[in-house]
Image (spheres, grey):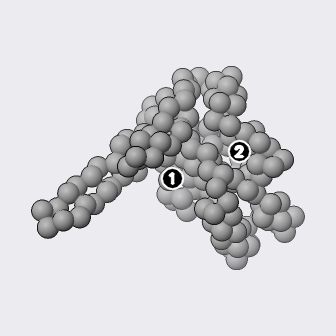
Amino acid sequence: MSARIIFNASTNPVTLEVLRDRLGLLLPYKCELDSLDYFGHTIPQLVIHTRVPIALQLEEDPEIVLEEISEMVTDAEDEGFFDEKTREQMRQCTAAIDLHTTTPPKVSHFEEGGMLISTPNDVDPRDHEIERILLSVASFVKGWVYDNLNGGWIVG
């Protein structure tokens, strides 16, 4: 994932359908629901047809999200980023919206056995149009955006 928006789903519940409808009103891009078949698992996505299409995925599994959010907030605290009140609000986050490329992963199989899966990262969260979308989503869900590609929080 290129970026992650963290938010509190208990106070700001959201679905990909709600995001599609909201972004469809705010953005000049086509927004459509889709899914990714990832080794037999279907992952719902909201695809936004920017110059380089992007996909948003909703992650609400506490087994995955809570520990990662805790680490993100601890890092923000260590870096002196955000005030204590904001970091405390961030610690209440229970879900994430992840930014992904729509370019499919490349799977290479080796004669000796095994395989290598590589996903091109052609989505830069600092690209003006993508950053605008991330900040719009974060504002809507009352969340915060972390840029995994370049490192650091995106604030608007």
Question: Crowdedness of circle 2 by 10 Å Cα count: few (<14), some, many (20+)?
Answer: many
Q: Residue furthest left?
A: 111
Q: Quadrant of residue 90?
A: bottom right
Tell whether 150 sits left or right of 136: left
Picture layout, residue 145 above or below residue 111: above
61 shown above or below 139? below
Rendering coords of residue 22 (x, y %): 70, 28
Q: Residue at x 22, y 55 (%)?
A: 108
Which of the 4 image quarters holds residue 68? bottom right
Residue 152 horizontal side relative to residue 150, left or right: right
Pick the front one: 65 or 133? 65
Q: Position of residue 127 (x, y in %)?
A: 52, 43
Label 1: which residue?
2
- Left or right side of 136 for 149: left
What residue lies at 72% left-to-right and 39% top-to-bottom?
14
Q: Secondary structure at mark 2?
A: helix
Front position in the image: 75 or 68: 68
Q: Position of residue 128 (x, y in %)?
A: 56, 40
Residue 28 location in percent, x, y? 59, 23
Q: Residue furthest right?
A: 85
Q: Amino acid at mark 1?
A: Ser
